Image (cartoon, helix red, strand yellow):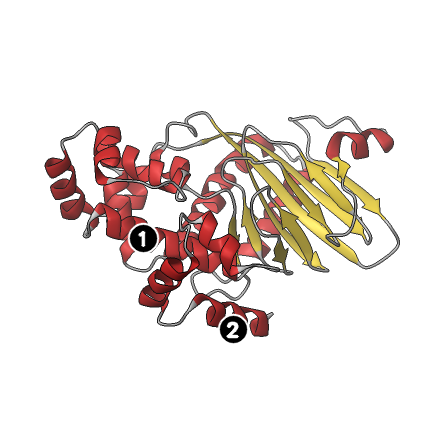
Amino acid sequence: MDPLSDVLGDLRADAVVTGRFTFGAPWSLRKPALDGAPFRTATGEPFYLVVAGMAPLRVEPGDCVLLPHGHEHVMCSSLDETPVVFEAMMSAQGIEPRLDTPLAFRAGGDGAVSDLYTGVVMFRERVRNPLLASLPPVIHIRAGDPAVPALLTTTIAGFIEESMQRGAGWRVAVARLADVLFVQILRAYLGKHGSASTHWLRGMTNLQLGRAIASMHEAPQRSWTVEQLAAIAGMSRSKFCLRFRELVGESPMTYLTTHRMYLAAERLAGAGARVSDVADAVGYASEKAFTRAFRRCYGLPPREYLRSCELGH
């Protein structure tokens, strides 16, 4: 059984927009919300990516970031810079972006350069796909992560460069390659869940459980009850709990706690994270209760985990 293939089997890129952005420091760009899933990788200097309500992410060379829901976001060389809206930046250069044409431009100052290789994948069935609906606003795959195929980031860069040439049949080739790259990014992300990802995907392939799991992922901070989740699934409480345990391998509340702790660890690894803010973001009004749950999951309290992340930076 291959649950990921089951979930993604019918998902095909409808269209892909690619580009290569060269920025010299200082620079800051605000990208409005998109009806698609942008992914980025970069060479040169690190940059920051900021989505409202989330701690800023420092994206190192070779990292890969994916915004599955196309949230508005800011990319910048420094968090102190005032962002320029994408359309205004293009207008200032006399560029009119087109969905059917790869985009290349240079902007910013005369400082250290960041080269961003970027693509936006549009899926006709994106909203109804249970896996995509359950993904977080940002997926950050770090260079050197053992879950990442060794050539992923270089393949993405090569894919963007190839699309810029617009050779014969390039639109079809780009869409097919984007499918492969998108799935590779998701595989790397799901690899972080370990063997539990198989059970989660098994639940996602079930129409009723999939709705409940997607709701937990969409609003992990909500004070969910089993009764509320069972109602979303359209099942009785007892039948919901039984079926959830059969497919996912644990109870709904245990699954929710594990998912919250995964999100918490991701946030604690971000620059400028505060334990109290992270606790609130994953549904804990009490920092003490959050600390107990985090320690049970990771074997150390969140403040110690945060310090280890800061030393790693």
Residue neighbourhood size for the residue with mark 1, other residues' Cα within 10 Å, grouped as few (<14), some (14–19), many (≥20) = some
- Residue in the foreground of this view, choosing between 238 and 142: 238
- The residue nearer to you, when weighing 262 against 8, is 262
The residue labelled by disc 1 is: 257
Distance between mark 1 and mark 2 Cα atoms? 22 Å
Q: How crowded is mark 2: few (under 14 residues within 10 Å), some or many (20 or more)?
A: few
User: Which mark is drawn over residue 308?
Assistant: 2
Q: In this view, does 32 lie above or below 312?
A: above
151 or 224: nearer the viewer: 224
Q: Quadrant of the C terminus?
A: bottom right
Seen in the image, is 153 located left or right of residue 98? left
Quarter occupied by residue 229: top left
The answer to whether residue 8 is seen in the rendering is: no
In percent of width and height, residue 290 lies at 39, 58
- Type of amino acid at the residue the image marks with label 2: Ser
Q: Is mark 2 on a helix, strand or loop?
A: helix
289 and 66: which is toward the camera: 289
x, y percent for residue 35:
55, 28
**Lower position in the chain sequence, tag 1 or tag 2:** 1
